[in-house]
Amino acid sequence: MRRVITGNQAVAYGVILSRVDVISAYPITPQTTIVEELSELIGSGRLNTRFLKVESEHSAMAALIGASTGGVRCFTATSSQGLAYMHEMLHWASGARLPIVLVNVNRALAPPWNIWSDQSDSLSQRDTGWIQLYCENNQEVLDTILQAYRIAEAVRLPVMVVLDAYVLSHTSEPVEIPTMEEADSFLPPYRPEHPLHTGQPEAFSMIATPEHFMEFRYKMQKAMEQVPAIAKTVDEEFRSRFGRGYGSIERYGEGEAEVLLITSGTVTSTSRIVIQRLMERGVSVAGIKVKRFRPFPSEEIYEEIRGAKKVAVIDRNLSAGVGGIFAQELRASLYSKEERPQVFGFVSGLGGRDITPELIEEAIRCTIEHHRPEEEILWLGLKR
Amino acid sequence: MAKQIHFNKASEMPDVSTSLGDMDWNKTGAWRTQRPFYEDKTPPCSVACPVGNDIAGFIQKIAQGDVEGAWNLVKEENPFPGVCGRVCFHPCESKCNRGRYDEPISIHGLERFVSDFASSLGRKIKKGSGARKEKVAVIGSGPAGLSCAYHLTRLHYEVTVFESSSFTGGMLRIGIPSYRLPKEVLDREISEIETLGVEIRTGIPLGEDLGLDDLRDYQAVFIATGAHRSRGLHIPGEKGRAVLSGLDLLRQINLGKHVRLGDKIAIIGGGNTAIDVARSVIRLGKRATLLYRRSREEMPAFEDEVMEALEEGVKIRYLVNPIRIGQIDGLKRLECLRMELGEKDESGRRRPVPIAGSNFFIEADSVVIAAGEEIEVSFLPRGMERRDGLVLTERDGSTGVKGIFAGGDLTSSQRTVAHAIGSGKKAALAIDCYLRGKDSEEAIRQILIGEGPAISIFRYLHPDERPRSPHVVTFEELNMDYFEPSKRRREPRNPIKKRIRGFGEVTSTFPEGIALEEAERCFSCGRCNECENCYVFCPDASILKREGIFSRQVDYDFCKGCGICFFECPRGAISLQEEAR
């Protein structure tokens, strides 16, 4: 079934098709319509899912930690301040190895108060032990939720599915919606490895002294290291069933380009057009869309950029004191490699400012024209 | 007990920290710097009770639905719960911590309920086993004498009570009108004492038919002959016709004798006898006016009864002092002076001072003088010291004469039923000590309620019961987070019109449901009632429910001494002390 729906509706469809057992969420712009849609379905009896009303995002995640420990499939959605408020429980969910899926609608963190898109909220949570998947369009949003549960439940780690505020959340696009049967055949019911029994009480997540703590973190890292292979299998299976796949990264444009542009989220769609135009004018350029931020696809990216001279990264986020976070991760992943192209780190579009085709072209031109970046942070579209 | 689990390899470990054993090996109690412990303390009501009733104890039993248990507990200390529940001035209630929160518990109402409920079930107090060879004589069958006889019997002595008049009960029978204390209630509680084995011989007055020589067979004697002589006013005309003593009039009415009275009665006095007379004559269809020389505030009569008297139509004229009783046209004519209040006297009340030239007259058919009672001394054995109109005794009731003890109104200016019962009980203990050659002072000290003066016979009889700290629990030591405001239950009260038509009881006993509700209001100050708050709050699951003298115990293997149980205890039944190192 093909329907014209918003990104937030696509999220709701993804949740319905995933047969989620428990939802707990607290409303926040621009996430609100996700939960509105789902709670109305539950309220009217059309969706057999338990909805737990809570007074905060912290409690929403805490509630899901309990539910997920009980062995059911859980979902929540939030944004910006809400995600920040959830921070403590994000660590708890991953440390407790719970396969919860969370949708975060990217929105800038205040102050100044702002409800528009940038990635500072989700990227602030990069060290919480969550898998992070960024989406480019509404179809990908729906598809990624189905994939997210497969990955999460396979490695016992939570997944954050990320989409841009308004550009996706409140913008309608045609989306192919799988049938329930199709979804079921791809995503089987959740079978917890360690189900709870009332007759056999246990304590969870209690103290581990220095004697054991480190080993728990080691096992968590090992689980993260399994993600690339598992995600690849899941994506391939998805492609074979639905004809759509995404990979952890996607390369587009010229095969042997000298300059590569790295983007994530909806900026990629704009970049595709810009790169197409430039190629038509004979510019040697290609693009890489990074879908998975955690675990960072270092090897996959390296394989694509090792032959290039220069790489431009457009970050819709800022880690004050360093710069764009994607650029930072990329630089770190290249340090031990033999072929290290120059990395031009652009910061743009903060707080929802449009990243226009002109700005993207400016970034590519700047990269072509300079031997090396003149500044650590290259501000794009800034009124200096 | 599980051992601590160690892993040598990450691969052996679960992915999540999950309980694989228990933590019993980890005695976290070693971290403790302060130690909580269950410690019963003294509720303020018990300290205020001259009888020494275990008030919080019996109310707790009612709240648990165990009224018989409550009755047993009451009877440990007091043979007269039905009497006290009706006529005691309940000082316990004015000290009740709940009074600081909303309204005090109706302790008297509950005591009365317990007595009546148990009697309706036909409960009888159990006789103790064992017997001692000594015999004790008790002179006087009032509350002091019978309380002493009751407790001595429970201490296994053979007791004979000698009563001068033909009826038992002393002032309880002749001094208290039956609208306050029905004769059936008194008879019932006296008969329970007799059932225990106390022999009461009536019609044997001390002095005339009974000398101390006649009591040679008895190894100890307790004298509680009371204060039955009406005090005079020492004014001209008080010996005349139609001038009666308050106590004489009450005796006649209470014994059901016919009394000849005019229609309009003037009663001189402001004490309980005056009020009893006034309310009694109102019930005989007369008009009663009380003449009192001070103001309402200084009146020694109990506030509630003054209120009820006024409701029933008794007139009270304050600051009036009769100085002469004359006669005019067949009527009594009282010449009175108006008074004003001056400086405080030794009783702490403001002294009435006559206003010169304020003389006026009040006419009445009869005049009743109720100016207090004195003790009869003529028949008392030689060697008993007296001071200020009272027989002098030690704290334990012993007199200057070996083997002779005294109590009740004879020895105390606090002329209440409760004080009389308390003094009889203390004398019983002292007689036991005397006969066993023990130090009674030391024995009393061990069973004082709080710092005294009342004692607990229960603890004397059961020294192994759980100890009780003399510390009196203050309102500030309670945790009001656990109590909701609630109204004090009041005993159903007959309408005034019905009341003044006869000598039926003014109020009636709580129905069972109301008594239960009222009992549940009790804070149970300093007394664990197993509310489980500590059990629920303890973060270390270190509250153990065990059989034993304390049904709750702290598991010191694991208690870290956080003190939450102590702070959250609603009633101050847990103490906290620094851990000894």
Image: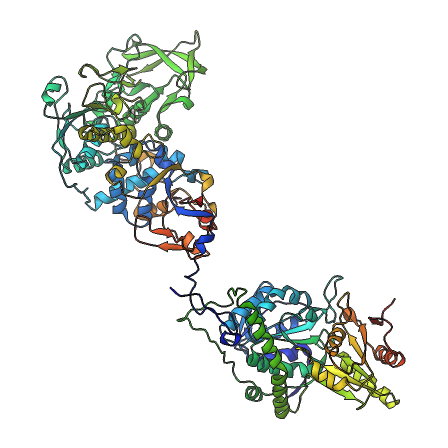
In the image, residue A119 above or below residue A288? above
Q: How is the image coloured?
A: rainbow
* Number of marks present in the image shown: 0
**In the visual, does B218 lie left or right of B243?**
left
- What residue appears at the point 56 percent right and 66 percent down from the top-left corner? A62
**In the visual, does A286 lie left or right of B326?**
right
x and y, in percent, of residue B579 in the image: 44, 46
Q: Which quadrant of the structure image shows residue B103? A: top left
**In the visual, does B135 lie left or right of A85?**
left
Q: Which quadrant of the structure image shows residue B314? A: top left
In the image, residue A320 above or below residue A362? above
**In the visual, does A51 lie left or right of A143?**
left
**Is the N terminus of chain B in the top left, top right, bottom left or bottom right quadrant?**
bottom left
Of residues B317 and B10, which is closer to you in this image?
B10
Any part of residue A239 in sight: yes
x and y, in percent, of residue A144 in the image: 64, 82
**Is the C terminus of chain B in the top left, top right, bottom left or bottom right quadrant?**
top left
x and y, in percent, of residue B443 in the image: 27, 32
Any part of residue B211 in sight: no
Of residues B356 and A276, which is closer to you in this image?
A276
The residue at the far front in this view is B8
Of residues B61 and B393, which is closer to you in this image?
B393
x and y, in percent, of residue A269 in the image: 77, 82
In the image, residue A59 above or below residue B145? below
